[in-house]
Amino acid sequence: TQLLEQSPQFLSIQEGENLTVYCNSSSVFSSLQWYRQEPGEGPVLLVTVVTGGEVKKLKRLTFQFGDARKDSSLHITAAQPGDTGLYLCAGAPDSWGKLQFGAGTQVVVTP
Amino acid sequence: NAGVTQTPKFQVLKTGQSMTLQCAQDMNHEYMSWYRQDPGMGLRLIHYSVGAGITDQGEVPNGYNVSRSTTEDFPLRLLSAAPSQTSVYFCASSLTGTNEKLFFGSGTQLSVL
């Protein structure tokens, strides 16, 4: 059983469209991270959110941490083919807890 | 700056064989870890280390051994490979702990026949 549930599992959209990926849990996390992974490579950190209700922006990517620190979302505006990849969320239950990963959302953006 | 280096990139084993996956980092990170990635299951923690001489089990440790004799190296040993260990393995490190940015290697794709 995944501690962190990501949805959808797969998302295919056209260039220029918007998309949202969700990361949900019944547990509270002290922090939550989002990674992007490309084929044949390891995940690369995009952002870390630590405060309930926090919103962080990274160019066309907007990350939000839920008020109760149990969920998070990633919104991509005007997606581009370069946004294609596996998006993973990861959370730690406390400062010393082991990082738990969700199963990931595969995003494919076609020209 | 090499970051986290994993070798080999690909490996095929027969059931019962043993092997060691190598992981080295040149960032002077205290925390190092091994994950396996399987379709639909995300990354699962196998073993981790918070410093030289200290290791601990993660979520799926059975069938794997680790040691941390230096800050730089954290090898993962498969004692007697089984088909269930077919997976992609990632080594990751961070400065001090799991809440910090994890730096991943590029992975080892292992097939056990």
Image (cartoon, coloured by chain):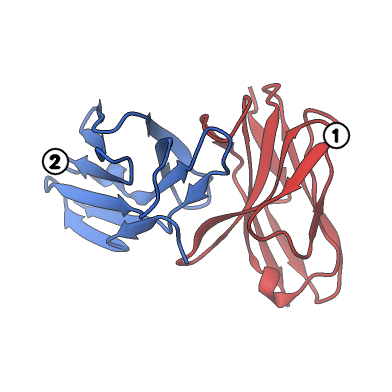
Which chain is displayed in blue in the rendered image? A
Q: Nearer the viewer, mark 2 or mark 1?
A: 1
**Mark 1 — on which chain does it sit?**
B
Relative to residue A87, is residue B86 drawn left or right?
A: right
Q: Residue at x 86, y 70 (%)?
A: B17
Residue under label 1 = B53
- Could you tell me how many numbered marks the image carries? 2
Q: Chain of mark 2?
A: A
Q: Is residue A20 left or right of residue A50?
A: left
* SS category of the residue bearing label 2: loop
What is the display colour for chain B? red
Whether residue A35 is situated above or below residue A86 in the rendered picture? above
Q: CA distance from mark 2 to mark 1?
A: 48 Å
Toward the viewer: B74 or A52?
Answer: A52
Q: Position of residue A65 (x, y in %)?
A: 28, 37
> What amino acid does circle 1 point to?
Gly
Tag 2: amino acid:
Ala
Q: Marks 2 and 1: CB-CB under 8 Å?
A: no
Packing grade of label 1 (10 A; few <14, some 14-19, many >=20) is few
Label 2 belongs to which residue?
Answer: A78
Q: Residues within 10 Å of mark 2 (few under 14, many from 20)?
A: some
